[in-house]
Image (cartoon, grey):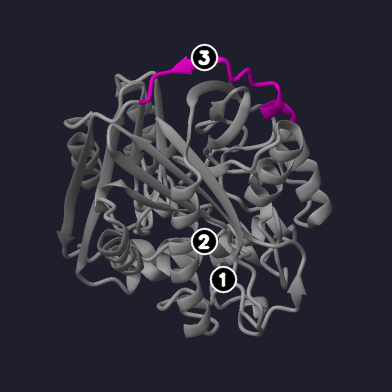
Amino acid sequence: MRVASSRVCLTPDEDFYLIGYGDRYNSRLVPAKGVHDDIFANVILIESNGKKVFIFNADFIEFEEEFCNQMKDIMHNEFGLETNLILFSATHNHQSVMSYHKNWKTGKFSQKYYDNLVNVIKQTFYRCEKNLVECNAFMGRTIIEGFYGSREHFYEKADNEVILVEFKNDERVIAGICNYATHSTVISPENDLLTGDLAGALCRKIFLDRGYYPAMIVGAAGDSSNRAYREKADYQELERISEGVAKQIALINVDQQINIQYEKDDHIKYRVNYHPKDDSEILLSKINNLEDKLKSVDDYQTIKLYKDSINTYKAKLNMKEIDITLSSTIISMNDLQIISIPGELGSALGIDLKEYSKAKCCLIFGYTNGHFHYILQPQLFKDTPRAIAGRYRISDVENYMNKIKEKL
């Protein structure tokens, strides 16, 4: 096995708009006022048994599937990479740039930034390919306490496991993966400065502790955030939370050697296609109830929660035909198994897949190779707006998970 890594700044050199949270915040309707901290891509190339696995992990909110597919074709045609072994992973940063995203509803798309992103991806692969070195792989894990968990049922855990994978050459870490599962959302939607938010802050702190910048791979975080533990929504709070989580990650002993030899890859497609039943009366009732509640609350967190739920129900009211094709890749490399998910997988579903996998180390790559919204566990369809008003039925979730399990 040979491995290489690269890190490149993705901060625009021209005016830009922030992405995330929609048009209800003025911070997304006007150009950003500046940069609090730069955003980056952390890139890893793994070569094993003649196969190359390319991981491009960026401080973006998401990658559009169309972009991923076009970029995969470019990488295949120019470098001979197999398309199933290319993973474009986003940290789901709601304070990132809008410039690369062609179909976002606020801000302005920049063809210049888009073209530069294409070149950056090609350049980082070329750089990695030239710097591949023999490595051994090691892993360690822990459970994070007290800083994030379920955002649907406060103070309950979600998937609070953090897995570190390090690729070492003569005791020097060549590359690393931090696989964790929570939204990278500490900073307020009113923020008007570019930042990597929680993922960016954690990445920098891991570098200070361990000497490398890991790919910050978000796992099954669809129902996980720091909302219940957040005291404020500013940069001081970002420092408090990121420092608290980083201290627990620093205690992980990455000392279990794992054998990484490419075995196979499987590409799974599952189509969701139906016409939602006419449940407008139920949705309108929920909207009216929440709007009444808004009149009597004044704390930021509750107001945001109610407004998010109202907007979710309204979006469901406007849905007609649902037609989504979910594409997942499973890369099996002996002791390591990677499962890509093109959306926001529920924590219980991620835990279930990791337990079902026969590999010593199973990593869930959420927000990877596309973004098709929340894919939440059936339990949350009882009382969770994101599940009730989402794009998937319970049967869709169960069938999609079963199709993945068939290949594990």
List the residue tagged with mark 1. Answer: 19
Identify the residue under disc 2.
Answer: 61
- In the displayed structure, 367 sits above or below 25; it is above
369 over 267 or under it: above or below:
below
Determine which residue is flagged by label 3: 256
**Label at residue 304:** none
In this picture, residue 259 sits left or right of residue 311: left
Residue 253's image quarter?
A: top right
Range shown magenta: 247-260
Q: Is residue 164 visible?
A: no
Estimate how packed mark 2 is, as few (under 14), some (14 to 19) or many (20 or more) residues with alpha carbons within 10 Å.
many
Residue 373 is a magenta residue: no
Q: Position of residue 245 (x, y in %)?
A: 70, 34
Give the residue type that dot 3 points to.
Gln
- Taking the spot 63% from the left edge, 75% from the top edge, the residue there is 12
- Could you classify mark 3 by the number of other residues whose Cα lies within 10 Å: few (under 14), some (14-19), or many (20 or more)? few
